[in-house]
């Protein structure tokens, strides 16, 4: 019996090692885009009116919801106030207001009413990465979901957003958004 407990413990340690070592240290980093063009200066791109269209996919890739959105940003030289209005295909309307503060040329912090703590942003070349925990309403409860959010500028008008949502380190959904600046 003791032999089986030892084997079980060793198996658990190996499994934990595999899970933790499978994290990809070569994953994409904002700095990978340092010298690429066109440069995305998030406070410039999101100032004024921007339209967006997107799809939400569950962890297996099935599209579960679609939306259109109107974004309106105001930049005061230090902070970007970004008002977002999402129109979901099931009739839900969702509003969010971000306050995004520029720390230096490459670093940002953001807050919003449904964001836990602060969002951390990084900007290099055409890429902007935003990391945050969002309170997501699910069946009458609010779940804390971690967002790994990337925006890539394509040209002066178009940017593409890809976000991976995780809970306890496991992917639960993905979001793809196309932004078009007026």
Image (cartoon, rainbow, N blue to C red):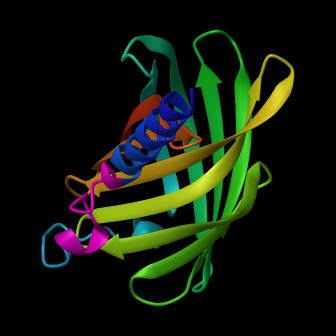
Please state the horizontal and vertical placement of residue 165, each as a whole percent of the image: 51, 39
Please state the horizontal and vertical placement of residue 159, each as a whole percent of the image: 31, 49
Compared to residue 150, the image places residue 78 above or below, namely below
24 displayed left or right of 112: left
98 displayed left or right of 68: right
Displayed quadrant of residue 138: top right
Compared to residue 38, the image places residue 51 above or below, namely above
Q: Residue at point 20% right, 52% down? A: 154
Q: Which residues are magenta?
A: 21-32
Compared to residue 146, the image places residue 88 above or below, namely above
Q: Is residue 141 magenta?
A: no
Compared to residue 132, the image places residue 80 above or below, namely below
Residue 30 visible in the current orientation: yes
Q: Magenta region, mostly helix, strand or loop?
A: loop
Residue 182 visible in the current orientation: no
Q: Residue at point 44% right, 35% down? A: 7
Looking at the rendering, in which quadrant would you find the N terminus? Answer: top right
């Amino acid at each position: 019996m003791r032999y089986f407990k030892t084997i079980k413990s060793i198996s658990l340690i190996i499994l934990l090692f595999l899970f933790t070592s499978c994290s990809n240290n070569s994953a994409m980093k904002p700095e990978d885009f340092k010298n690429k063009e066109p440069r995305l200066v998030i406070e410039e791109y999101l100032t004024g009116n921007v339209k967006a269209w997107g799809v939400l996919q569950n962890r297996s890739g099935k599209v579960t919801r679609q939306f259109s959105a109107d974004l309106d940003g105001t930049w005061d030289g230090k902070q970007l106030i970004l008002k977002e209005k999402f129109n979901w295909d099931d009739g839900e309307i969702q509003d969010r207001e971000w306050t995004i503060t520029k720390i230096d040329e490459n670093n940002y912090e953001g807050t919003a009413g449904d964001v836990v703590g602060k969002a951390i942003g990084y900007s290099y070349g055409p890429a902007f990465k935003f990391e945050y925990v969002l309170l997501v309403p699910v069946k009458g409860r609010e779940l804390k979901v971690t967002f790994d959010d990337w925006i890539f500028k394509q040209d002066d008008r178009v940017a593409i957003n890809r976000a991976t949502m995780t809970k306890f380190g496991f992917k639960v959904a993905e979001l793809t958004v196309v932004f078009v600046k007026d």
